[in-house]
Image (cartoon, grey):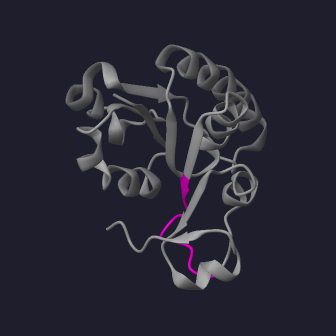
Amino acid sequence: MKRVLFISSTGGHLTELLQLEPLFQHYEASLVTEKTKSNASLKQKYGKRMHYLAYGTKQHLLPYLFIFAWNIIKSFALFVRIRPDVVITTGTHTAVPMCFIAHFFKKKVIWIETFANSTTQTEAGKLVYPIADLFIVQWESMLKLYPNAVMGGWIF
């Protein structure tokens, strides 16, 4: 059975990622997100398959740089422990290191650009687009910005 690591930041990106929950039963699935009070209960639901990174926001730049560096190290440790065949993400900054780690180890990277953007690229999407094995957009208008993407439609 393929090991699939599902990763996103918390909030709307996590809400989108959890729309893919029906896929979890078809794979040896692990879920990674930032730890916040709003999603701490996911550990009860997913048990050992649930993993957390530190929460950080770019609005507080100096602490964020340290948190991001820590999350890179923790992402690498999780990748080595989980050994996924595929990384699937709805973004954002939290998922970028995991995507590059997976790409380095020649594992599949599937990026689903957020539903929230219909006319502009996300910073994280721009970074991962060149290395993604499959880049999915939810709006047809986004195909102009990501010409090699696949139109997947809304996941809500």
- Please name the residue shown 62% across and 34% down the image: 98
Examine the residues drawn in magenta and state their main secondary structure.
loop
Quarter assignment of residue 155: bottom left
Query: Could you tell me which residue is drawn at 50 percent across and 37 percent down?
Result: 86
The residue sitting at 64% across, 47% down in the picture is: 93
Query: What residue is at 67 percent from the left and 20 percent from the top?
Result: 73
Question: Is 43 positioned to the left or the right of 53 in the image?
Answer: left
Quadrant position of the N terminus in the picture: top left
Above or below residue 34? Residue 21 is below
Image quarter of the C terminus: bottom left
Residue 92 in the image: state x and y as whole percent.
59, 51
Label total for image: 0
In the image, which residues are magenta?
A: 111-119
11 above or below 73?
below
- Answer above or below: position of 155 versus 143: above
Using the image, determine if residue 147 lies above or below residue 81.
below
**Image location of residue 77, percent across then percent down:** 59, 16
Counting from the top left corner in percent of width and height, residue 28 is at 33, 28
**Where on the picture, by quarter, is residue 95?**
top right
Q: Position of residue 119 (x, y in %)?
A: 63, 82
- Left-right relation of 53 to 156: right
| Lateral position of residue 75 relative to residue 145, left or right | left
Is residue 121 magenta-colored? no
Q: Left or right of 78: which side holds 146?
A: right
